[in-house]
Every structure is written in C-alpha cells, then in structure tokens.
Image (spheres, rainbow, N blue to C red):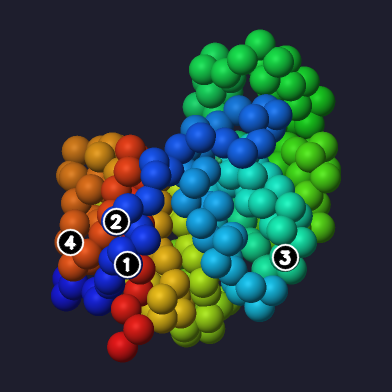
C-alpha cells in the first residue's frame, strides 16, 4: 500500500503517557487504556468537530468520551460504532475486573438478554451521557460511507485486531479525516491473526505514527 501522509507535532513528541483515567468512578468492564489520547482530542476539539470510535463493547470508552465532552460543555458530534452482535467471549471480560464490575456485568447479562446495544445504552444512561454519545449499529468499514471526505476530526480503531481488518479500516477512514485530524487505535503489538495484526497494518499505512503502550495514532498532514 502507498504510505499515507501523516505528521507528528512537537506536542505529541513531548506528551505524558496516554494511560490514566480522569474519571476513575467509571466502572464498566472493558480494556480501554487510551484515556489521555481521548483527553487531548477533546481539548483540541470544537463544537463542530466530528469524533468517531469503532468498537463499543459495553461502552467504557464511549462513556469516557461522553464525560470529557460533558465536562468541557462541548457539543461535538461523537459516534460509537459497533456491529452489536453478542458473542460468548464477551462474558469472559468480567473476570478481569473489580468485584463491583462483575456484579454489574452479571446483572446486565442476566437482565438484558446478552443484548449489546441495551448494555451500552444502560451504561450511557447510568453515567448520564446519553445525550453526548450517538450509537451506530453497523460494520466498521461500511459505516465510513456515511461520513464526508475530510470531515472527521478523530477516529479510533478498536474492533477486531487482525491485520486485514485494521488495514481496511485505515483505508476506509483515512480519507474521511480532516487535515490535522487524528487516526488512532488500540492493541498495537497485538496479533489476532498470526499475520502481523495491528502493528503491521499501522507500519505499512503511515510514514509517521506514535505509540504509547498499546495505543497508536497518526496525524493527517495538512497538504
Ligand atoms: C475491543 S472491543 C471494543 C472495546 C471498547 N472500545 C471499550 O472501551 O471497551 C471490540 C468491539 O468491536 C466490535 N466489532 C467486532 N467486529 C466489528 C465490525 N466488523 N464492525 C463493528 N464493530 C465490530 C465487537 O462487537 C466489540 O464490541
């Protein structure tokens, strides 16, 4: 693939680590660890910004973004995209979380019939951010068609971490990013398909990108 034009600003080179939550009271099972990246995105966003994440799971990262927008009283349009099809691996996550989260999780699964959309909406409501987060039920690549070229300030790739999926998500979404906007994702270094996973897809796609822990991101060039 021809490498996409990206740049790295001096701020990004000197920024502190990307992990560490501003809202530690958010107790939702999940793996989210790109808190500082979300904060930076919100700090540089405006009311007209369009922000997208691909992969909602139970809504942890979506609630976090909703909280940040609420705190800054920002009316940016934030979309979380997921196929919202239940899969039994989704239950396992509960074991990695605190006792409170396990209780919440058990309650949700038992009472909401393994319905991912209902679980996400429950969490948006529980944390008071239902008006800050727009849900899209759909495939992460097909959904890119709904957005105009150069219109998206930020897209975060967090669905299946196979090489092919991440490569195709980058191809679908990079044209939608506005100049100076950010394309990012999770699980850099993870390999779901024995074919290089996220790392290979990102390395091949961008001439410049940054990683911190499992988070990667690249800034779309102005020109
Ligand atoms: C790693 S989880 C997302 C984690 C989430 N950001 C969080 O904070 O917990 C991956 C999600 O991607 C979704 N997914 C998998 N394949 C997808 C696809 N082709 N299009 C959209 N979503 C997909 C799954 O349903 C799952 O909820």
Residue 74: mark: 3
Say whether marks 1 and 4 touch (CB < 8 Å): no
Q: CA distance from mark 1 to mark 2?
A: 7 Å
Earlier in the chain: of badge 3 and badge 4, it is 3
Q: CA distance from mark 1 to mark 4?
A: 20 Å
Say whether marks 2 and 3 touch (CB < 8 Å): no
Q: Is mark 2 within 8 Å of ligand 1?
A: no
Q: Residue furthest bottom?
A: 223
Q: Is mark 4 within 8 Å of ligand 1?
A: no
Residue at figure coordinates x 75%, y 26% from the top left: 108
Disc nearest the viewer among 2 and 3: 2
Residue located beneath label 2 in the image? 13
Residue located beneath label 4 in the image? 204
Earlier in the chain: of badge 4 and badge 2, it is 2
Q: CA distance from mark 4 to mark 2?
A: 21 Å
**Residue 18 falls left or right of residue 221:** right
Q: Position of residue 182 (x, y in %)?
A: 42, 66
Q: CA distance from mark 1 to mark 3?
A: 24 Å
Residue located beneath label 1 in the image? 9
Say whether marks 3 and 4 touch (CB < 8 Å): no
């Amino acid at each position: 693939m021809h490498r996409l034009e990206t740049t790295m600003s001096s701020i990004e080179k000197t920024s502190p680590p990307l992990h560490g939550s501003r809202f530690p009271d958010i107790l939702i099972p999940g793996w989210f660890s790109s808190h500082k990246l979300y904060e930076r995105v919100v700090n540089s966003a405006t009311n007209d910004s369009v922000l997208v994440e691909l992969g909602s799971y139970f809504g942890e990262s979506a609630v976090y973004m909703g909280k940040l927008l609420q705190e800054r009283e920002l009316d940016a349009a934030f979309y979380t995209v997921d196929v919202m099809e239940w899969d039994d691996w989704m239950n396992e996550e509960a074991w990695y979380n605190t006792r409170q989260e396990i209780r919440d999780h058990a309650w949700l699964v038992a009472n909401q019939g393994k319905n991912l959309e209902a679980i996400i909406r429950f969490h948006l409501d529980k944390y008071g951010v239902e008006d800050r987060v727009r849900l899209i039920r759909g495939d992460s690549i097909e959904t890119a068609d709904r957005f105009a070229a150069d219109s998206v300030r930020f897209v975060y790739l967090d669905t299946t971490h196979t090489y092919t999926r991440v490569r195709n998500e980058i191809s679908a979404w990079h044209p939608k990013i506005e100049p100076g906007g950010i394309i990012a994702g999770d699980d850099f270094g993870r390999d779901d398909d024995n074919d290089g996973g996220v790392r290979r897809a990102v390395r091949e796609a961008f001439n410049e990108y940054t990683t911190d822990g499992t988070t990667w991101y690249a800034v779309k060039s102005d020109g």
